[in-house]
Each structure stands twice: as C-alpha cells, then as structure tokens.
Amino acid sequence: PDLTGRIKFGPNAFYVDEIDYSVESEKEPFWRDVVKYFPTVKLEDLHPEMAGIRSKLQGPGDPVRDFVIKHEEDKGLPGFINLIGIESPGLTASPAIAEMVSNIVKEYLD
C-alpha cells in the first residue's frame, strides 16, 4: 500500500507515435490482469492515476537490443551517466551495472 493505504497496480505500457501524457481510461484489459492475482478487485475499484514516458531502444516487432550505459561527456554533459532501456535482465545484471557505473564515476572524479 501507499501512504494513503491504497494499493497501486501497474505499470501498463504500450507504444505511442507521439509523446502523450494523457491517462488511458480503458480499464478492462488492465483489470483482467489484476484479478488473476487479486480476485476480489472489481473493475470499478480501479482508478487510472498517472502516465509517463519510458525510454525504449526498440519498437514493436524489432529485435531485442541490449541496454545502453554511457557517460554523456561528449555531449557536453560531464558527470551525466545515461542508463537507457534497462528491462529484463536488468535486475539480474544490476550488480554488474552498478560496478560499471561506479567505475565510470571513479574515472570521472580522478
């Protein structure tokens, strides 16, 4: 539960052609997934709350690409380390990612 005692489900993701922060109001497909784990949740219990943009390295139907970890110094952003498109197996790789980022930071600070 969040600080107000409410449970949040999600995220739900889909591709868009243009940046759009409107909240998807079609609840039924999302609800069908929620009730698999929480069978007492009713459709009317769900209230869409927020939207965001998640960076992706490939579009629908494209082959899967590895994530990108890059110090953006060459773009005029010294100290900014970009971690883009980290999904599965990002959790499994998180210790190695942390070590890589730590090495980039150490190199930058030296």
Image (tube, helix red, strand yellow):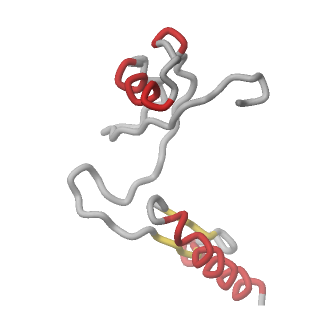
Residue 72, located in which quarter of the rendered image?
bottom right
Question: What residue lies at 49% left-to-right and 13% top-to-bottom?
Answer: 42
Outermost residue toward the top in this view: 44
Q: Quadrant of the C terminus?
A: bottom right
- Percent x, y of residue 108: 71, 84
Q: Quadrant of the N terminus?
A: top right
Is residue 16 rendered to the left or right of residue 91? left
Residue 109, located in which quarter of the rendered image?
bottom right
Q: How many marks?
A: 0
Question: What residue lies at 61% left-to-right and 29% top-to-bottom?
Answer: 8
Is residue 52 rendered to the left or right of residue 58? right
- Percent x, y of residue 15: 33, 41
Q: Is residue 86 above or below residue 43?
A: below
Viewer-nearest residue: 50 or 46: 46
- Percent x, y of residue 62: 23, 58
Is residue 60 rendered to the left or right of residue 23? left
Question: What residue lies at 42% left-to-right and 22% top-to-bottom?
Answer: 31
